[in-house]
Image (cartoon, rainbow, N blue to C red):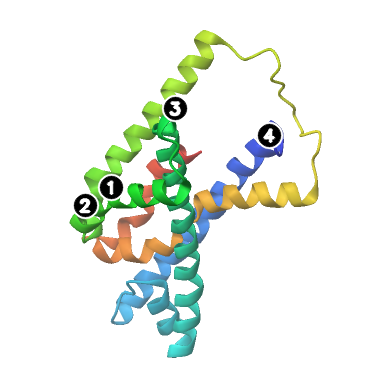
Amino acid sequence: ARQLGWVLTISFIIGLAPVAVYTALLMSRTSNILAKAGARPATMGEAARMTLGGDRAAGMVYFAVYGFAFLGNASYILILGQCMQGVFFQSQLCLPTATAVACALCVPISVSVRHLSESVVLCFINLFLILAVLAVVMGKMYFVGRPSHVNTFAFAEDLSFWGVFGAASNVVYSYAGHWLYFELMVDMQKPEDFPRVFLINVPLQV
């Protein structure tokens, strides 16, 4: 919002949600068509192999999709380290040490969750933690009020093409869980019901 102003921020959040849902529906239809042909893809690489034909196409998709996921998870690990620094700010932990500690704390969770179906409770805990943090922040803003030096602009004063592009990319990334959708569908008892998840997911995300 600081980079765009509230008009463009809200426009991107609302406008890109239908695009994300539409592409997810295309993936669901593709999965159902391939399942009727004999095999349901469990990954985007397998879907590429079945639709585009050949290991080369599958390899390219695997590299692009999971390379993207690797970089995304790497950024999450750095954020975990920064959060650890914030929690133990008096200790003055350097970022590498804080990141290593955060990773060590995550190891029990990553080892105990081997299948997507086992992560349901963890996902709900994560959801309620996010809602709790938002409630605390919004509650403080309501009771304390906004600082006098803070200004809200319909359009950011220093708006630029690259600023808009970068901020829009962040919004796109927030909707970009598609690399996991085939894996989710293959674990479902009724994969054809997968689109129903967006009746809950999209309103919460927006």
Of residues 137 and 32, the one nearer the viewer is: 137
The residue under label 4 is: 2
Badge 4: residue crowd in 10 Å (few <14, some 14–19, many ≥20): some
Q: Is residue 177 visible?
A: no
**Under tag 1, what secondary structure?**
helix
Which numbered disc flags the more N-terminal residue, 4 or 1?
Answer: 4
**Under tag 4, what secondary structure?**
loop
The residue under label 2 is: 108
| Residue drawn at (26%, 56%) of the image | 110
Residue 180 vertical placement versus 9 (above, below):
below
Q: Are marks 4 and 1 in contact (CB under 8 Å)?
A: no
**Under tag 3, what secondary structure?**
helix
| Residue drawn at (37%, 74%) of the image | 33
Q: Are marks 1 and 2 in contact (CB under 8 Å)?
A: yes
- The mark lying in front, picked from 4 and 2, is 2
| Residue drawn at (25%, 58%) of the image | 116
Badge 1: residue crowd in 10 Å (few <14, some 14–19, many ≥20): few
Which numbered disc flags the more N-terminal residue, 3 or 2?
Answer: 2
Q: Are marks 3 and 4 in contact (CB under 8 Å)?
A: no
The residue under label 3 is: 134
| Kind of residue sitting beneath label 3 | Leu
